[in-house]
Image (spheres, helix red, strand yellow):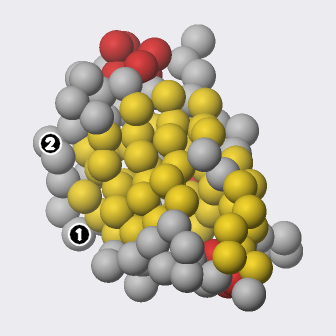
Amino acid sequence: QVQLVESGGGSVQSGESLRLSCSVSEFTKTYSRYLMAWFRQTPGKEREGVAGIDSDGETKYMGSFEGRFTVSEDAAKTTLYLQMNGLKPEDTAIYYCAARRYPLFPHEGLWENTFTYWGEGTQVTVSS
């Protein structure tokens, strides 16, 4: 069974950086075409897409995340990363790693119901 495991969350001050990691080796060993992404969720809100990268190397950023956040994967395709710079208190959320079997379609966004595999999430807390 494919498992995604996030790590790297924690508590930081406003303006600081964090890098989240997600172990994806079981997924990428199984599927050669894929999309992997980061989502986040705060209490009372729906889960929202942050950034994704597919097996063709295409990246997708939702909203205003591009420029502050960078999504990447390692060359061995075992780990998905989310580098978060200039963190703000409103970035406080549980961050989830997600994956699906097919890459990005043209002009497609990152929508929760299109992903099959999910991690348990990692908490990020940013204080002012």
The residue under label 2 is 56
Instruction: Indicate the secondary structure of the residue bearing disc 2.
Output: loop
Going 35% across and 69% down the picture, which residue do you hit? 61
Question: What amino acid is found at the position of numbered circle 1 in the picture?
Answer: His
- Residues 67 and 3: in front is 67
34 up-or-down from 128: above or below: above
Q: Which residue type does callout 2 highlight? A: Asp
**The quadrant where residue 56 appears:** top left
Report the residue that reaches farthest toward the right: 44
The quarter in which the N terminus is drawn is top right
Comparing 126 with 13, the one in front is 13
Q: Quick one: quadrant of the C terminus? A: bottom right
Q: CA separation, marks 1 and 2?
A: 15 Å
| Label placed on residue 107 | 1
Q: Residues within 10 Å of mark 2 (few under 14, many from 20)?
A: few
Q: With 102 as the anchor, is 6 left or right in this view?
A: right
In this view, 82 is above or below 4: below
* SS at circle 1: loop
* Mark 1 or 2, closer to the camera: 2
Q: Is residue 123 left or right of residue 36?
A: right
Q: Is residue 1 left or right of residue 19?
A: right
Q: Nearer the viewer, residue 28 or 15?
A: 15
